[in-house]
Amino acid sequence: MNLEEIKKLEDQLWEAADNLRANTDLKPNEYATPVLGLIFLKFTDNKYSAYEEAIQAEFEALQGTRRSKSIEEIAIKHCGFYLPPQARYKYLLELPESADLATKISEAMQLIEDFKNDEKFVDVLPKNEYKAFSRLPESKAALKGLLRSFSDIPADASGDVFGRIYEYFLGKFALSEGQKGGEFFTPTSVVKLMVEIIEPYHGTVYDPACGSGGMFVQSLHFVEHRNQQLKELGELEESDAAIDLSVYGQEKTRDTVKLAKMNLFVNGLRGEIRQANSYSEDPFNSFESFDFIMANPPFNVDDVAVTTVEEDKRFNTYGLPRKKTKAKKSDGKAETVTNANYLWISLFATSLKNKAEAKARNTGRAALVMPNSASDARNAEEDIRKQIIEDNLIYGMLTLPSNMFYTVTLPATLWFFDKNKADDKILFIDARNIFRQIDRAHRDFTDEQIQNIAMISKLHKGRRQDYVSLVDSYFKSGMQILGETVSDVKPLITQLKSVIDKDSAIKATVDDLAKNWQALAPLQDKYEAYVSTHSL
């Protein structure tokens, strides 16, 4: 399926799912996880079907020999999991109306986990969440309707298609849940911009507040797109196009961890998601460990105890954001940091690989979402900021428009770190007036706006050829559209000329229009001359 077909399918599936919810008593937060689980279920069925013939053939060939294996073993070798008959999508779809569909789907999810043979995948899929569909007859009918709706996803749809559908639904659910939704989902256009600037081509990617895993998915799409470009230019062989990314995420909310793990599995990403509180737990020993880091952490948290972080080198290397006046023992309260924003900033600065490794691997870059207030915070925060700047870790700051997030309306700032900087300068980008209005309360970036903003960073690094390539892509796209328009307009102009009186005032307008289309060839010549002059 091409992108246009996927987009059309996404819209159709969401419209069907949204209409079905309207006929139930389910709240958006009760609906999201079960729906995403059904998308996952259809994905596993499609994937298993692609390997099923080979699995069955090997099973039959080994029957009665000393090398005989169970079909479950063979399936796990080929596909990564075994899908028993009761977990097949068709089986669930064809259950009689009298069947307890919610229970049957829960049982199917349990069977998938049982046969995944991976301890990291235990208790990941939604099961009890389907009980809500048993409350009313309308809800039961909605669950059946959802199954039918997702059966419209083509049987040959691959992980890439499912990954896009899953991410699309995550975004829609986050938008419908407002602030709560923003806790597990960062708007895709913001993540795309972060990825385009830090360019995580290879290595380890860490998100210490990973939500549903969107940072990881966009990193994957970035590498896939880059590899496709290189293949088209003849600079990358198919055999060398393997994705070299490993992702590591922490998330404190158990249900959100489930969403992230399903997201990784659907998108075919290698990595690990742990349920952990980043202030007090460090399951990946993150100090100087990662090639790239991205996160959109909670803003302005003020209840983190100093005792939790004061001995942790992830947070104390550049100092702690402590109150000047410490809590008195008589207060009966533990001293807390003034604001956890600078705990996150310190975590980023210390979790990237050291400068020597970053230089050797061309990595050591990070992107962090912070409230604008963090950029000029005073007192202890100012001291931390000064040390990080003097250590030459800040690559740039980008101010975002307001209303880009579901949790806050005030504008935020993207902080970019780079342990492999070529100079001691800091790039500042004011993007407050660059956006597309989605509705009254929400904005995002178009793909062209993302590319244009990211190009400022590339030009800052002296990558002039990237700018020429971007202009070239815009020109080719524009010329293609104009060329298609010319094909449509030329017959109309001929018809107009045949019916318009020679002395008519309209004739001059039609003649001018025809001359404009004839100027396309000279425009092409001028552009080719420009590319020739400016290419390196």
Image (tube, rainbow, N blue to C red):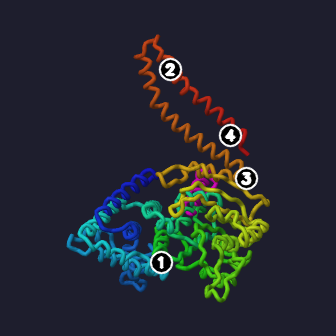
What residue is rendered at 48% in x and 55% in y?
Answer: 441
**Quarter location, residue 106:** bottom left
- Where disc 3 sits, the SS reads helix
Q: Position of residue 168 (x, y in %)?
A: 45, 60
Q: Position of residue 505 (x, y in %)?
A: 48, 15
Amino acid type assigned to the residue bearing label 1 in the image? Arg
Of the image marks 4 and 2, the number of the one nearer the N terminus: 2
- Frontmost residue, 233 versus 477: 477
Task: Mark 2 and mark 3 in contact? Answer it, CB < 8 Å.
Answer: no
Task: Mark 1 and mark 2 in contact? Answer it, CB < 8 Å.
Answer: no
Q: Which residues are magenta?
A: 219-237
Q: Which residue is mark 3?
A: 460
- Label number found at residue 509: 2
Of the image marks 1 and 4, the number of the one nearer the N terminus: 1
Q: Position of residue 525 (x, y in %)?
A: 64, 32
Q: CA distance from mark 1 to mark 4?
A: 53 Å
Q: Residues within 10 Å of mark 2 (few under 14, many from 20)?
A: few
Q: Which residue is mark 4?
A: 531
Task: Mark 3 and mark 1 in contact? Answer it, CB < 8 Å.
Answer: no
For the stretch drawn in magenta, what is the main secondary structure?
A: helix
Task: Mark 1 and mark 4 in contact? Answer it, CB < 8 Å.
Answer: no
- Label number found at residue 254: 1
Q: CA distance from mark 4 to mark 3?
A: 20 Å
Amino acid type assigned to the residue bearing label 4 in the image? Val
In this view, 119 is above or below 533: below
- Where disc 1 sits, the SS reads helix
